[in-house]
Image: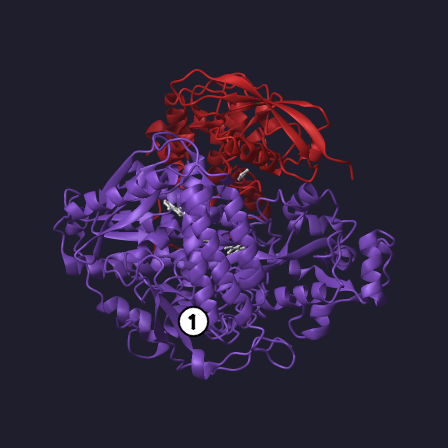
Amino acid sequence: MKLDAKIPAGPLAEKWSKHKFNLKLVNPANKRKYTVIVVGTGLAGASAAASLAELGYNVKAFCYQDSPRRAHSIAAQGGINAAKNYQNDGDSVYRLFYDTIKGGDYRAREANVYRLAEVSVNIIDQCVAQGVPFAREYGGLLDNRSFGGSQVSRTFYARGQTGQQLLLGAYSALNRQINLGKVKMYTRHEMMDVVTVDGQAKGIVTRDLINGKIETHSAHAVLLCTGGYGNVFYLSTNAMGCNVTAAWKAHKRGALFANPCFTQIHPTCIPVTGDHQSKLTLMSESLRNDGRVWVPKTVELAQKLRKGELKVTDLKEEDRDYFLERKYPSFGNLVPRDVASRNAKEMVDEGRGVGASGVAVFLDFAEAISRLGEDAVRAKYGNLFDMYMQITDENPYKQPMRIYPAVHYTMGGLWVDYNLQTTVPGLYCLGEANFSDHGANRLGASALMQGLADGYFVVPYTLGDYLATIGPKAVDNSHPAFEETKKSVQERINKLLSLTGTKTVNEYHRELGHIMWEYCGMARTEEGLTKAKGLIRQLREDFWKNAQVTGTNEEFNQNLENAGRVADFLELGELMVDDALNRKESCGGHFRLESQTEEGEALRDDDQFAYAAAWEYKGDNEPEVLHKEELVFENVKLTQRSYK
Amino acid sequence: MSGNMNLTLKVWRQKNAESQGKFVTYKAEQVSPDMSFLEMLDVVNEGLIKKGEDPIHFDHDCREGICGACSLHINGRPHGPKHGITTCQLHMRSFNDNEIVVIEPWRASAFPVIRDLAVDRTSFDRIQAAGGFISVNTGGVPDANSIPIPKVVADEAFNSATCIGCGACVAACKNASAMLFVSAKVSQMALLPQGQPERYRRVQAMVAQMDAEGFGSCTNTGACEAECPKEISITNIARMNRDYFNATLIKNEE
Ligand SMILES: Cc1cc2nc3c(=O)[nH]c(=O)nc-3n(C[C@H](O)[C@H](O)[C@H](O)COP(=O)(O)OP(=O)(O)OC[C@H]3O[C@@H](n4cnc5c(N)ncnc54)[C@H](O)[C@@H]3O)c2cc1C
Ligand code: FES
């Protein structure tokens, strides 16, 4: 297989506009002869479904929640980037492009990232027109804040609920099309497989989560907008239902999976309290605008704090080590996420961690409160502080927060070309589910931007080109491929339901999470990864013998839903480990202990690894085959990232 | 920190929409005060699954108070005893050792039970689809800063927009009225300049759908506001009533 990214020729700044001109169009009267399936109605899916329906296509949209408004995008807190330069602080499309490429440690495709920066400005206009109530200044214009990895203020926000407001905006656009009859919405439906006919995606198989009905749906094209797979780690900031199933099934039907090991560990999350923990809660990166990260200067002081012999407020200024400010004077607390996370881990490994477990560092607002006043801090971050108080029973206005890194985002995902098409013709992938724009590390406030860019401004153009090429002749679901795929879905469900062992699905999930976190988390080694591969295989085999899955298919059965998702994670986990083993360099969030600079920063190996690793599925328990998309940098110079 | 607790749960179990439900008693043992309420239920469910029994079904997803999926009537109150939070944000430190905890689904005819504690809230989506939008297509919109909006207005619209669509307002109301939910959306858009062109059409369409779904009428008791996990203000209802009244006056304006 030859990977063709289909990057348009010409200067970077002209690629997208030229490409749009060269794409084939479907004439307005013909659009209603086409049906498009959109799986997932988070930011990426809802914006795509609404925009395609506005153009005149018939859309069938699916989500597993009871409403599109509950997609995990709703939980995004901090903000969304756009190169508006409203602050007149030197921002530009090129700077946003450059920051994103550099932030991703030079492992993303230049052309895609440039396009993302280019359309970012339209996103804000669109959202405001929909009635998204962004934060404003007294003069009535939009307010901005800063996020990690950049030195300009380009992040638009709606208090600590930016994702909620953007998703409700996209949801309202989707609703309008549902009302007009152009979108048929299927909630509480899980996509179980992709149907391909002659190598092209022509539909999907779904399970109605209320009554277990297995159904087939046909269409001219299928868009997967199904989010990230961070829950492979069991504990993450993702919602409980986030899964890899849709992407994984597509992978098994021929879509290559790229850079699966690129996961983002977010530096500021509320630490784990015990085994009962079911998820981790993020404290938005925006807090690092005003919060200062520190640990006690010495191990002795840290021990005293942990034992309760000292109170945090007793610690004098000179006994505190503001380690990010010390090590990275120009970016300070706003270094990118991978750098902040690794440094927190380093402090804990040195024995200077805080909290009862010692696995945490402080995020302190005392300075901001004395500078701005408690009310101003409350106005900016009130909801986050409340959330923190609910969970920890501690008051962050009076004492510093305890935070620790947690799995947050997956940069890896289905490989897509410039048109967002996977290696299966007719199968597209948008949002967090694809691998495209963030390289080895995503900058804060860029995922919302990417999801909406893909859905509102990219796929409505690029999909038209494909549809115009294949023509409106419909494939209906009487084609045998539909029946065959449906049968394989039913067989797998039956196999899951036949498991009457002694261990719960959650227990397997938790164990998988431990393995991934330990060996494929913030620091990775050849030895650890090799060990992890064996452990995951054993665990997977054991799952298919000893798991307990209760109930039947023909009912609302959350245990069965979960079992299917965990079974897929048990396969994905191994591929992540393979990918991490293959990539012997460090880059962004992928930190191989064997490859670091003298100062302990990620050391890339551009000669060997300036490529996206795209994996091809070859059959159950067969090794996957690696395909390389060489990354060509014509506009930026690859340098050692420095935030000093 | 206080020690672990033992609780008695009385949980509503109902196989599906058609079947009769009943309360079943379970023991929740060695519950840590640091657990969330849903994590406590997870532990109970793990025990049930190990015995080969069906776990208790309940809706949940984000577990941080924003998606609106979790529900639960706990000891007679939507989202439990604490003010201004959702069930997933409720922690067991709010309960006492040996307490009896009664857990029921939302009760409203417009929210039929799907199974156990999970109910069907798609009526909310249909109300939104009837008019909860501003009719703009993707692309071709003005620059975001072309219309300044006073900060107080934007903030007020934001406050209304923070509704998570969980349905606690309906569950709290003796009439099972959806007025707080509907008015929050109507207000958000009525406050913003972008929402003006369809202001009156919107309120009529949404109210008509609300009535068609079988929600009850509002008698101003304010239980909705008191139980709303996002503290959506009842002034939204007043604002909606005013708009609805105006809409009937200027019906032929368009
Ligand atoms: C706590 C938190 C805070 C964040 N804050 C920010 C921030 O401030 N700024 C920022 O830029 N990014 C942030 N992010 C990241 C960002 O929110 C996500 O990357 C982004 O919203 C993903 O959008 P999406 O549309 O790709 O996927 P999602 O919103 O996850 O949507 C996935 C959709 O797919 C559906 N689905 C999944 N699987 C199936 C299946 N098998 N069958 C049917 N449907 C399925 C779901 O129902 C859902 O509708 C944050 C993430 C988290 C976890
Ligand atoms: S689970 Fe999302 S609000 Fe409770």
Name the residue beneath numbered marker 1: A108
Image x and y of residue A326, in percent = 73, 73
What amino acid is labelled 1 in the image?
Answer: Ala
Dot 1: element: loop
Residue B180 vs A444, above or below: the answer is above
Given the image, what chain letter belongs to the residue carrying mark 1? A
Residue in the picture at 48% in, 52% down: A539
Which chain did the renderer colour purple? A
In screen coordinates, is A486 left or right of A395?
Answer: left
Q: Is residue A322 visible?
A: yes
Q: Is residue A142 visible?
A: no
Identify the image quadrant of residue A299: bottom right
Identify the image quadrant of residue A187: top left
- Colour scheme of the rendered structure: by chain
Image x and y of residue A240, in percent = 50, 44
Image x and y of residue A216, in percent = 24, 41
Task: Please count the marks in the image.
Answer: 1
